[in-house]
Amino acid sequence: MLPAVLHVPVPVNLRRLFPQASFVGCCDLRVTNATEHSRECTPGALFAVIRGTKADGHHYVCEALERGAKALLVDHPLADAAVPQCIVSDVRRAYAELCQSLMAQPANHLTLAGVTGTNGKTTTTWLIRSILQAGGHPTGVLGTIEYHDGSESERSRLTTPDSAALARWLAMMVSRGTTHAAMELSSHALEQRRAAGTLLDAALITNITQDHFDYHRDFGAYRSSKLKIFEALKPGALAVVNVDDAGSRSCLTDAPLRTRTYGIDQPADITAEILEATLRGTTFRLNLGHERLTVRTRLIGRHNVSNCLAAAAAAAHLGATPDEIAKGIAALACVPGRMERVEGGQPFDVFVDYAHTEDALRHALRALRPLTAGRILCVFGAGGDRDKSKRPLLGRAAAEADLPVVTSDNSRSEDPHSIVEDILRGFEGQRRTPFVEIDRERAIRWALQHAGPGDTVLIAGKGHETEQITGAQRRHFDDREVAREYLSTMFPVDHRGPPHLMLRNSLTVT
């Protein structure tokens, strides 16, 4: 349930909001309630008739009218609808802008950072929040794990909320005295203009690799959707781009003049030198313009240092001092399901990570490789009803583990055996032969059984998720719980041996 709304809608005149629109059956429309879902229509509401990829709002106009809709927002006049209509060229964009106007443009009263990218969005937004909070700024976050208004939170349904929910959450932030916010902007949300009318003080692109090609078709279209984040920048706002990633770097040609780059390997405005990396965290030297400071993060891996750079670049623009940046990065102990440690007294390390793309899985494995004294065991799968072309790529990435374990993820309407077959094509010609176990719980247990002292087990793909979707069934399933419960049977408290910290390797640069 959404927390009680602390900000009520204000009346909006559509002719004033959309001066280029035309009207049928009226000269103007005064709106106090709008929705894109016919089932949510109440007497007096405006129904936005949006053409979706799976459903067309035109098929639900009759239902909306039966439920009391008094007006329509459409891209062409509907002769069979005897209600006032506002005609606009882009209903998605207009509806999002209307939602923001109904909530009195809350983004104008917030200092707001938006983050897009194939990977790293969640960690980067959590880092930004931590840094800003270290500076005393009440900060909200909207993203894959939670929607948080600075005081109350709710588990998220979408990485980026739909237009109406986004406007309500931003309005609640303002009402609660929250001054800053960091939000994830998915490629779907940017393409669908869900955040139109929400202007940003900083826009970040962490990377662009391969994901969601089932929706975007190809890399060019996917990249184009990411570039739309620049359209949301306020005057004087900052674009932040990762130059270590080729896809992100390619966006520099389309970036605004006010842009800062970050990178570890490539020359950039903001850089880092990794001084020490262990399975307990990373120490690095942050080069922030003319400032040089040593920063400690409990996050693991080179890719997380990159996320720290992204957050530092945005936070500095938003007013954070170097000391606040260092304190905020150090204060973030963990991001749920992002290289999250699972402890059970075992003589090996276990991590659960959301990595579900080739790029993310490679980064996770390569982060663990130099820090693991023994072998790396990797449990992973691929989601059903999603981009099939990335499945063999996941297999190819997982072949970097010493013992890959292929299993099921959220198979949805697909046969999990068919998904696994797609993944296994990625192992052709590789020197690793994976172990296959369709049942995810048994696969996790198998990996834990076969791990020895000094090994690392990576359970990838679902991260923070607490459900597994098979067909129409949703059942509770949490990789962390499964691992923790099984470890407790393998290593009962009364029989646990001495700490195994000495088995952990580390990488130190002097």
Image (tube, grey):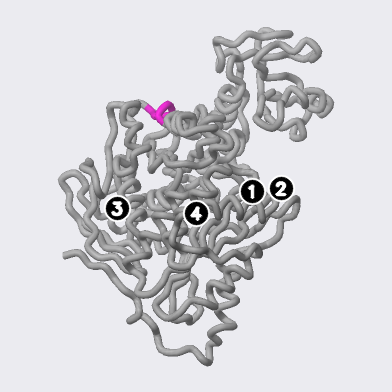
Tag in front: 3 or 1? 1
Where are the magenta residues, as a range?
A: 230-234
Camera sees residue 318: no
Marks 3 and 1, Cα distance to the nearest angstrom?
40 Å
Q: Nearer the viewer, residue 197 or 495?
A: 495
Is 231 in the magenta? yes
* Disc with the residue nearer the chain's start (3 vs 1): 3
Q: Residue at x 61, y 55 (%)?
A: 420
- What's the mark number on residue 428? 4
* Residue labelled with disc 2: 413
Q: How packed is label 3: few (under 14 Cα within 10 Å), some, or many (20 or more)?
A: many
**Image vertical order of residue 354 relative to residue 42, above or below:** below
* Residue labelled with disc 3: 325
Amino acid at pointer 4:
Glu
Amino acid at pointer 2:
Ser
Camera sees residue 9: yes
